[in-house]
Amino acid sequence: IGVEGLDAYIKLLMTDMRARLTAGDGRDHLVDAYQEALDGAVYLRADCDRRDLSEDERLCSWRLFERTVEFAYALRIRLAIRRGEVRR
């Protein structure tokens, strides 16, 4: 993908993000983010098991899965600290 293509994807991402910003709605957004990260990890792990993927596609899904698990782990640590479940 060239730079122009990346710019187009970034613009799409930013548009999607702006549409989802809902601060002050009473929800615990950190919990929501953690739960969404867990969902994403499960979906990506399932994608790795698809039989119709090329080896490159499977590797890409596996890397995304690993990054999503790392993100979920970081969120869980932050939640645990905030809730007083662990000491810093």
Image (cartoon, rainbow, N blue to C red):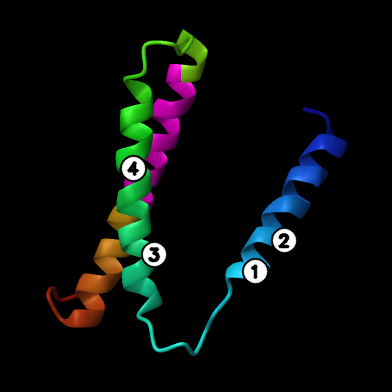
Q: Which residues are magenta?
A: 58-71
Which label number is shown at residue 19?
1
The residue wearing badge 4 is 41
Between marks 4 and 2, how big is the CA–CA gap?
Answer: 23 Å
Which label number is shown at residue 33?
3
Between marks 4 and 3, how big is the CA–CA gap?
Answer: 12 Å
Between marks 1 and 3, how big is the CA–CA gap?
Answer: 16 Å
Q: Is residue 15 above or below residue 64?
A: below
Query: Residue placed at 26% from the left, 72% from the top?
Result: 79
Q: Is residue 42 above or below residue 51?
A: below
Give the residue furthest to the right. 4
Amino acid tagged 3: Ala
Between marks 2 and 1, how big is the CA–CA gap?
Answer: 6 Å
**Mark 4 or 3 closer to N-term?**
3
Quadrant into which the N terminus falls? top right
- Residue 74 in the image: x percent, y percent? 33, 59
**Mark 1 or 3 closer to N-term?**
1
The residue wearing badge 2 is 15
Q: Are marks 2 and 1 in contact (CB under 8 Å)?
A: yes
Query: Residue placed at 44% from the left, 35% from the top?
Result: 64
Nearer mark to the viewer, of 2 and 3 = 2
**SS at mark 4?**
helix
Amino acid tagged 4: Ala
**Mark 4 or 2 closer to N-term?**
2
Query: Residue placed at 67% from the left, 53% from the top?
Result: 13
